[in-house]
Image: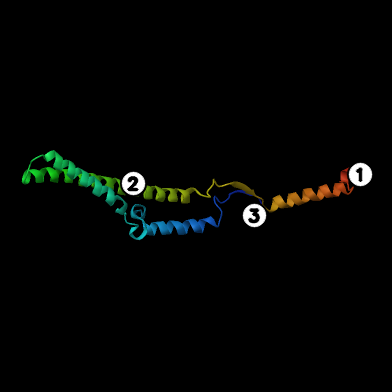
Amino acid sequence: MSFLTGKQKSGPSMPQDLGPLRQSIMEFLQQQGFGTAISGPQGGPTLDTSPYKAMFAQNRAEAVAGAKEQAGNLTGSGLGNVIGAAAGRSVAGENAFLANLINSNQQAAAERYTRLLGGISTAGVSTPQTYYQPGFLDYLFQGASQGATGASQLGWQPFAAAAAA
């Protein structure tokens, strides 16, 4: 008998065509995994160090030249220790620079991945709207009311009004 009376219903929180699209994107991301954010799909792009090689070579040459000048008149293992230490510091600086570069690239990729997930979870979604779905009796009384209004506009009067006149 619930069809006779109206009831409160809750509407969808997002358009119907958005659900399958969201589901397919989520399945793709689950297949790729979070590692995609770090390395990119299928291993991702490798870090190209060629632009930095000339800079590293120049810094290393300056470090070795400075070490030779600092060594003065040392020869043999003393000279080798001074030059080796300077070259080691130069290489350590290069490695720190590259590690920082790789880390910043990974963080940028992880942020892109997070923004993508954030957009999927909130785009097109709203609070479900509550609405009233009329039942049979609602439509019956609405029709009777419109019928009575139409009859009065045509000049028809209810029985009691006609008898009193």
**Category of crowding for the residue at label 2, using alpha-carbon neighbours closer than 10 angstroms: few (below 14), some (14–19), many (at least 20):** few
Compare residues 132 and 128 and report the one nearer the observer: 128
Q: In which quarter of the image is the N terminus?
A: bottom right
Sooner in the amino-acid sequence: mark 3 or mark 2: 3
Considering the numbered disc 3 on the image, is that residue within a helix, a strand or a loop? loop
Q: CA gap, disc 1 to disc 2?
A: 92 Å
Q: Nearer the viewer, residue 2 or 27?
A: 27
Q: Is mark 1 on a helix, strand or loop?
A: helix
Q: Do the residues labelled 3 and 2 touch (CB within 8 Å)?
A: no
Residue at the image position 82 percent from the left and 47 percent from the top = 149
Q: Name the residue under label 1.
A: 163
**The quarter of the displayed image where residue 35 is located:** bottom left
Q: Is residue 112 left or right of residue 47?
A: right
Give the number of the disc on residue 104: 2
Between marks 3 and 2, how big is the CA–CA gap? 62 Å
Q: Residue furthest right?
A: 165
How would you rate the neighbour count of disc 3 (Cα within 10 Å): few for under 14, some for 14-19, many for 20 or more? Answer: few
Q: Residue at x 38, y 59 (%)?
A: 31
Left or right? Give the position of 16 relative to 71. right
Specify the amino acid type for callout 2.
Answer: Ser
From the top left corner, tell me how far across and down residue 134 is, in percent: 66, 50
**Earlier along the polypeptide chain: callout 1 or callout 3?**
3
What's the residue type where badge 1 is placed?
Ala
Is residue 89 visible in the rendered image? The answer is: no
Q: Residue 3: which numbered mark, if any?
A: 3
